[in-house]
Amino acid sequence: MPLQNRVDPFGEIHSTAARGLFTGNRGIIHDAATKTLRKRRWTSKAWIICDLVHPRGTAREVFGRNAPSGGAGWTELFFLDEVTALAAGHRPCFYCRREAARRYAAAMAHAFSVSPAKATEIDARLHGERLAAGAKPRPISESEAGNLPDGAMVAIGPRPFATRGGRLLPWSFDGYGAPLSHSRGLPAPAFLITPPATVAALKAGYRPVWHPSASPR
């Protein structure tokens, strides 16, 4: 049975055989002996998005004992793509994805008219906006949804959708489906999934990595 380590756009963690483009973590939240998650869903406000291949080529045992001391080490989580990870409240890692992290920080700084933000400042802002950390859902109107930048995600009823090219693409662990028809409008009340700070960074020019299934059809 697959480990419980696949993250959906709401930030919840599931067990599924579906694969993704990125890994990441929220600190140590697993038991290495049983390879199961503990009750806590984060031990750090630094929720990051990492490359699947470690820059130093270090081999890891998923949910194993990967710390130099022999302890659990950080808990590997996996995402369909960067759009999904951003929606869940994660941000690019300043170690293995330094250029992406710099572009994200610069976009956020531009959006909020501040000097380049430090990682701890970004994490603190995001943590107050993460649905999986207890933030309240933010209702969004049809007109507001239509003006979201590419890469922002919304929920229509219980289903997550990603915005791309003015279209809403239904999300699943396996990829994106056919876009929602413009003529139908929103079939149910909607709310914003992606943290507002990240939406601001997307509006300011940050371009996330998409799963190939989101390509125009």
Image (cartoon, rainbow, N blue to C red):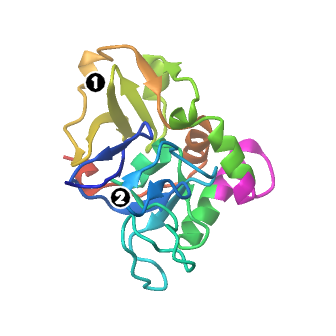
**Residue of label 2:** 34
Is residue 70 found inside the magenta-colored segment of the image?
Answer: no
Q: Residues within 10 Å of mark 1 (few under 14, many from 20)?
A: few
Question: Nearest the camera: 59 or 105?
Answer: 59
Q: Image point 44% across, 43% down: which residue?
A: 150
Q: Residue furthest front?
A: 33
Decide if residue 183 is on the left or right side of residue 38: left
Q: Earlier in the sequence, mark 1 or mark 2?
A: 2
Which disc, if any, is residue 87?
Answer: none
Is 198 rendered above or below residue 105? above
Name the residue rendered at 25%, 17% in the picture: 184
Q: Which amino acid does the dot numbered 2 rest on?
A: Thr
Residue 23 percent coordinates (x, y)? 41, 62
Callout in the foreground (1, 2): 2
109 falls in the magenta region: yes
Residue under pointer 1: 182
Query: Could you tell me which secondary element the residue under label 2 belongs to?
Result: loop
The residue nearer to you, when weighing 56 against 92, is: 56
Image quarter hosting the N terminus: bottom left
3D distance between C-alphas at marks 1 and 2: 47 Å
Q: Position of residue 171 (x, y in %)?
A: 28, 39
Q: Secondary structure at mark 1?
A: helix
Seen in the image, is 170 located left or right of residue 197? left
Majority SS type along the magenta span: helix
The residue that appears at 20% across and 40% down in the rendered structure is 177
Q: Residue furthest top?
A: 188
Question: Above or below — where is 13 with respect to 54?
Answer: above
- Outermost residue on the right side: it is 115
Q: Looking at the picture, how far across and down is residue 44, in whole percent?
A: 63, 52
Q: Magenta region: which residues?
A: 105-120
Residue 101 spot, x, y in % from top left: 59, 63
